[in-house]
Image (cartoon, helix red, strand yellow):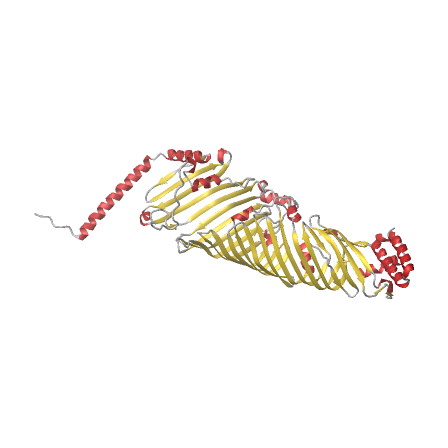
Amino acid sequence: MTPANPTPRARWKLLLAVGLALALAGLLAAMLLLRALDKDALVGAAAEALQAKTQRSLTVAGPVEFTIFPTLGARLNEVSVSEPGGAGEFARVQSLRVGLAVLPLLTGRAEVEAFRAAGVKVAVVKDARGQFNFDDLLRLMADPAASEGGASPEPKSSKDPSGSGLPMALAVESILLEDLSLSYRDLGSGLRAELSEVSLRTSAIVPGRPSAVDLQGLLRLNQPSLALRFGIAGDLLLQLGEAGRVDLTALRIDLESRLAQAAAQRTRLEGRMGMDLNTQRISGDLRADALDLDALLAQPTQAAAYAALGAGLAPVSANSEDASIDLSGLKALNLDLTLAVGQMKASNLRLSEVSARLDAQGGSVRVAPLKVKAYGGTVAAHLSAQAVGQRLAAQATFDGIEINPLLIDLANRDVLEGRGRLVLQLQTSGRSIRGLKSALAGSAAIDLRDGAVKGINLAERVRTVQGYLGGAPASAAASTAEPHDTQKKTDFTAMTMSWQIAQGIARSNDLNLMSPLFRIGGAGEANLIASTLDYLVSAKVVNTITGQDGKPIEKTRGITVPVRVKGPFSAVGWEIDTEALLKANLQSQIDKQKERLGGKANEAVDKALRNLLNR
C-alpha cells in the first residue's frame, strides 16, 4: 500500500519538530560547553593578555558567572586593574552584570537585557608632559594587534558595526549604575577633581523612543575650591544611522553648593541638550530664572575648604599669583550652547536679562555675543580663550551705565560717580595670574556725564593754595597730603579719559574733566602688576573760588594746581604738588614782567628769575 503524501500542515509540523530538536541539541551542547569551561583559566588568560600588552595586572577576587542561553552574559565581582607596572590601582569594580539576548541577534538586533554596575572607581592622572595614564588602553582598543606587531584592522562602516552588511538595531532594557567615582589629577597644573556618589538610572532605551534618565553626583575641585552636588533628569532620545544623535529633552539640571558655610545654594537650569554621534559635538539651550555663581562657587575659609574637600583635594590659595593656569583642557571641548538667565550674580556683579552663546572647538572657546542689562545700562561683550598660546581676550562696551555701583561691586572702590560709556579691549597670555598681568595689553576708554571724582574736594584744597602764593614756607606742603575720603568729592559736568595698556602697564595722557570751577587734564600710569597708581592731575581754575568767609579769592583765578594721585589701588592718596605749584606761579609772574618790561630789561629779568627757579 502506497503511503499518502503528507499535507502542508504536516510538513510544517515536521520542520518545526526538527528545528526544536536542533535548538535543544544546541542548547544542550552550549550548557555542556559552559560546564566544561574553566572560569579561572579564562580569567587567567585575560590577565596574561593584558599584562603582555600593557604591563597592567588584572585581578578578579570575587565569583565569576557566565551564561550562554537565552542570555549571553557575565557577572563579575571584585575586579581591579592596576597602573602600568602594577604600581597603584587604576580602576576597580565591585560588581558588574551584563546580559545580551541571544535570539534577537539572529535577526540583526542587539538587546541588552541588563547592565548593572556598582562600586566603580577610576583614577585618572595626567602627567607633566600631558600624557594620561590610560593612553595605553586607548591604543590597545584602537589596534589590539599593535603590541604584537600585527596589522591594524580595517575600520568598519558606521552603518555596519558587525561587518555583516546588515544594520544592527540596539535596545537596552535598563541601565543601573551605583556608587561610581572618578578622580582626576593634573601633575602639571596641580588641578584635582573628583566625581563621587554618582548614580545613573534609565528606563528602556530603544532608538526613536524617549527614555527617562536620572543622573546624580557630587563634583569637587581644588581650582577653584568647589563642591557642587548635581542632578540631571530628562528624556533621552537615541537615533542611530548616518544622522546618529543623542538628545536630552525636558532637561532639568539642579545644582547645589556643598562648600559654603551658609545655607546650601540651589539653582535649576532647564532646556535641552544633544550630541551629534558623528562629530561628537554637543549643542544645547539652557535657561534659568536666577543663577548666583558666587554662591555656587563660594570661596570658604582655608580650614572649611580642607574639611569639605578632604586632604586629597587641598585648595590652592586664591592669593597665589604664581599658581599654574592650564588651558589645555579646552582642546577636549566641542560645544555649541546658548544660555538665558533672568537674574545673575557673578564676581559680585548684579546682572539681568543675560543671553550668551558659547562655541568651543579645536582648543578655542568663544562667548559671543554676550548681552546683559546692568547698572541702569546695557553691556555687549565678546570673550575668548585659546589653549594654544594660553591666550585670553575680551571686548566689552558698557552703555548708559552708572559707574559708581559698578566699581563698588566689581572692585569695592567708591571713587567715581556719573553715567556714561565704558569701552574695553583687552588681550593677554600666560600660565599664571602674574604672567597674565605681565602680558596684559589693549585699551580702555571712559566717557561720563554729570558725576564726581570722590576722595577729594578740589575747590576746598585750592583755597589752601593762597597761602603758598602768599609765601608760606615749603614745609607746609605736608599739610596738602590726605587719604582717600569718600565724603569729599569734586563735581564735573563731563569727563573723558583713555588708557593704553602694554605689558601690564596702563598709561593715560588725555584726561579731560570739565566743571564750573575747573578745566582738568592729567597724565600718568597704573601698574597693573604691582597694583599701584601714579597720576598727575593739572587743575586750571577758570572761575573765582570763594573763601570760608564767602569772599572771592582772586589769586586763585587762572592758576593751575597740580595734584598728585598716588599709591596702591587699595589706598590711593591725593597730594597737591606745592613745588610744581610755586614754580608755575613764579613762571606766571615772569611772563607778566616780560610783558611789562620788554627789551634788554626783559632779558635780564628773565635770566634772574629762571636762575631762581632752578635753585
Residue in the foreground of this view, choosing between 357 and 247: 357
Say which residue appears at 53% left-offset and 42% top-offset: 183
Can you give x and y, in whole percent of width and height, for residue 376 in the image?
65, 63
Can you give x and y, in whole percent of width and height, for residue 613 in the image?
87, 53
- Would you identify the image quadrant in which residue 140 lies? top left
Can you give x and y, in whole percent of width and height, for residue 335 in the image?
51, 53
The image shows residue 63, relative to residue 443, as above or below, that is above
The total of numbered circles placed on residues is 0
Does residue 61 appear in this view? no
Does residue 165 appear in this view? yes
Can you give x and y, in whole percent of width and height, for residue 403 in the image?
68, 60
| In the image: residue 369, left or right of residue 100 | right
Say which residue appears at 56% left-offset and 56% top-offset: 367
Q: Furthest-right residue in view?
A: 601
Residue in the foreground of this view, choosing between 329 and 68: 329
Q: Furthest-left residue in view?
A: 1
